[in-house]
Image: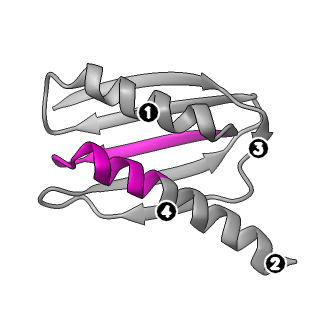
Amino acid sequence: MECLTFNYPAKTPLPECSHVGVVGSGDLEIIMVPNDQKVINVEVNTSIDGFADIWKVVLERFFEANHYAMNVKINDFGATPGMVTMRLAQALEVSNTHEYAQR
């Protein structure tokens, strides 16, 4: 088990909390919570050691395009980089959809 942390700059707060995915064979869970710090704090708990460089590239690419201030917790059980990106996008969509549903 490996725990990784990353930080990225943010511009606006995440609209709402979101939770997607489940920790299971080859999958992952992502929890996003808004913060007011103008930063994206990411904590990755992964069952597979030695892939910090891959995580760094995947997360940098995603958060270069998505600047919401939030705390992100990722619980991984061997998901591929493509699955990680898809779940991150899904979590943002859930957060943004909830905001629009309240209007």
Disc 4 element: helix
The boundaries of the magenta stretch are 69-88
Circle 1 is placed at which residue position?
A: 59
Camera-nearest label, 2 or 4: 4
Kind of residue at badge 4? Gln
Q: Position of residue 35 (x, y in %)?
A: 71, 39
Badge number at residue 102: 2
Q: Which residue is mark 4?
A: 90
Percent across and percent down for residue 9 are 67, 24
In whole angstroms, how far apart are the C-alphas of marks 1 and 2?
29 Å
Indicate the amino acid at tag 1. Answer: Leu
Q: Position of residue 29 (x, y in %)?
A: 35, 56
Q: Which mark is residue 16?
A: none
Residue that label 3 marks: 13
**Distance between mark 4 and mark 1 Cα atoms:** 14 Å
36 relative to 75 in the view: left or right = right
